Amino acid sequence: MMKRFKVYWTKEATLDLEEIVDYISKDRDSAAKSIYKKVKSKCRELETSPERYRRVPELLDIYIESYREIIISPYRVVYKLTKSNVYIIAVIDGRRDFESFIFDRLLRISTTM
């Protein structure tokens, strides 16, 4: 039987996605809905196969291996994988300064997880 993981969205990641969708919807409402559906659909796949996506290269460089990411170009969905859970911690536009963003996010959520 295939192992199933519980997927949790942090408040921060939920806000990230809402902000992205709000921004896109100002110009193209249908594109915003499409991005939202695509991100949510890909994240549901994490229930059965969270290991299939790559580890975050910027974090691997400093020996942090528990974070992975889904690329939904140009967006990066970053999540932490534990033995039975997946915590989605960020949805970021890959064109932003990813390193600064992710280090700041990890510092802020480390006290809540």
Image (cartoon, rainbow, N blue to C red):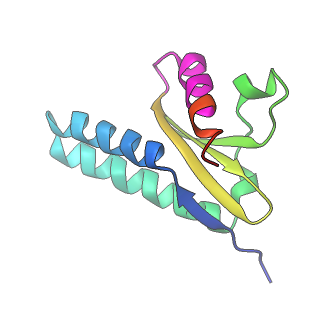
Quadrant that contains the N terminus = bottom right
Magenta: predominant secondary structure element? helix
Image x and y of residue 49, in percent = 70, 62
- Going 16% across and 45% down the picture, which residue do you hit? 29
Residue 55 is covered by the magenta coloring: no
Task: Examine the rendering and report whether any part of residue 74 can be seen.
Answer: no
- Going 60% across and 46% down the picture, which residue do you hit? 112
Image quarter of residue 63: top right
Identify whether 82 is placed above or below 107. below
Instruction: Kindly give the residue lying farthest to the right in the view shown.
Output: 63
Task: Examine the rendering and report whether any part of residue 110 can be seen.
Answer: yes
Residue 98 is covered by the magenta coloring: yes
Identify whether 17 is placed above or below 61. below
Say whether residue 107 is left or right of residue 29.
right
- Going 51% across and 15% down the picture, which residue do you hit? 97
Image x and y of residue 34, in percent = 31, 51
Image x and y of residue 3, in percent = 77, 74
Say whether residue 99 is left or right of residue 62.
left
Say whether residue 31 is left or right of residue 100.
left
Which residues are the magenta region?
94-106
Instruction: Between residue 89 and residue 38, name the one nearer to us.
Output: 89
Image x and y of residue 47, in percent = 63, 67
Say whether residue 50 is left or right of residue 70.
right
Identify whether 111 is placed above or below 61. below
